[in-house]
Structures are given as structure tokens and as C-alpha cells.
Image (cartoon, grey):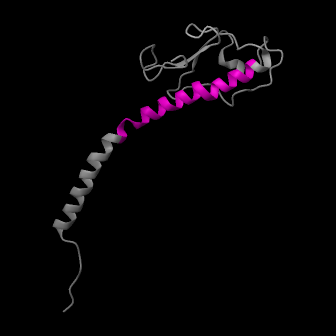
């Protein structure tokens, strides 16, 4: 007589329970990661990508773009930039939440150059803002 090899219902249920327990431990740890990734991306834009573009603009033109020109001056030549060698950015400066970064020059917090920040997840000035002055 031949015997058939197969899993019993109890063995299958045990595997499902083990997988469920592992998922219950791992999923809560991954839940907040997407917001952390957005904050990290905004920090990288503010402190590296856009900051570098602004410094290149300043090197070429002797000053940072004024607030009324905004970050658009990094994409399209403004009338106040005689030595503009841009575009300094590849695309519009939009934060990970889909809003334009806020740019002020001279800055209120950094009067020597500029303030650059994202209003964060809530889109309002609050503690979740990602800023270049802290």
C-alpha cells in the first residue's frame, strides 16, 4: 500500500497562526515609516538640493533671489539676475506633501541669507514644519 504525503489541517492552521503573529509584530513598526520618509526627503531638499541651487544662484548673481521672485528664479531667469546660468533646479520645488516650499529672503530667522521651509503634513505653521534654521 502506498501512503500519500500531505499536510494535515492542524499543521496548516499552525503555519497560519505563526505567520499572523509575525505580521502582528512587524506591521506596527512599518506603519510610521512613510511619514518619516517624507520628513527625511523634505530635510534633504531644504538642506542640500535647494540649498545648493540657491548657493549656485548667489555665486552667479551676487545675491539670493528676493522673496517676490521666490524659488521660481531657480527655474526661469528673473529680470534682476544678469548672470543667470540656470536652470538651477530640474523641477518645481514641491515638498513631499505636494505643496511649494516657502522661501523668504532675507529671512526672518536667518537674516544673513534666507529662510526655507515646508509646512509639513498639516500645511499650517506648526511644530511639524521642516525648516532650515534649526
Q: Position of residue 4 (x, y in %)?
A: 22, 82
Name the residue rendered at 68%, 21% in the picture: 54
Q: Quadrant of the N terminus?
A: bottom left
Front residue (pair 99, 63): 63
Q: Is residue 96 above or below residue 80?
A: below
Q: Position of residue 63 (x, y in %)?
A: 74, 13
Q: Residue furthest left?
A: 10
Q: Position of residue 19 (x, y in %)?
A: 27, 56
Name the residue rendered at 45%, 13% in the picture: 125
Res 57 visible: yes
Name the residue rendered at 26%, 46% in the picture: 24
Q: Position of residue 20 (x, y in %)?
A: 25, 52
Name the residue rendered at 24%, 51% in the picture: 21
Magenta stretch, main secondary structure class: helix
Whether the magenta-drawn stretch holds residue 117 is answered as no
Q: Which image quarter: residue 88?
A: top right
Whether the magenta-drawn stretch holds residue 40 is answered as yes
User: From the viewer's perspective, is 36 left or right of 94?
Assistant: left
User: From the viewer's perspective, is 80 left or right of 51?
Assistant: right
Front residue (pair 42, 108): 108
User: From the viewer's perspective, is 59 left or right of 98?
Assistant: right
Magenta region: which residues?
30-58
Q: Which image quarter: residue 51?
A: top right
Q: Residue furthest bottom?
A: 1
Res 75 visible: no
Q: Is residue 19 above or below residue 32?
A: below
Amino acid at each position: 500500500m502506498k501512503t500519500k504525503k500531505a499536510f494535515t489541517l492542524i499543521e496548516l492552521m499552525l503555519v497560519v497562526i505563526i505567520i499572523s503573529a509575525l505580521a502582528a509584530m512587524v506591521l506596527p513598526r512599518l506603519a510610521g515609516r512613510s511619514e518619516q520618509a517624507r520628513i527625511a526627503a523634505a530635510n534633504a531638499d531644504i538642506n542640500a538640493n535647494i540649498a545648493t541651487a540657491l548657493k549656485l544662484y548667489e555665486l552667479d548673481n551676487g545675491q539670493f533671489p528676493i522673496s517676490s521672485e521666490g524659488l521660481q528664479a531657480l527655474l526661469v531667469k528673473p529680470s534682476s539676475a544678469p548672470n543667470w546660468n540656470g536652470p538651477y533646479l530640474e523641477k518645481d520645488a514641491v515638498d513631499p506633501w505636494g505643496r511649494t516650499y516657502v522661501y523668504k529672503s532675507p529671512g526672518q530667522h536667518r537674516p544673513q541669507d534666507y529662510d526655507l521651509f515646508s509646512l509639513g503634513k498639516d500645511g499650517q505653521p506648526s511644530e511639524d514644519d521642516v525648516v532650515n534654521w534649526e
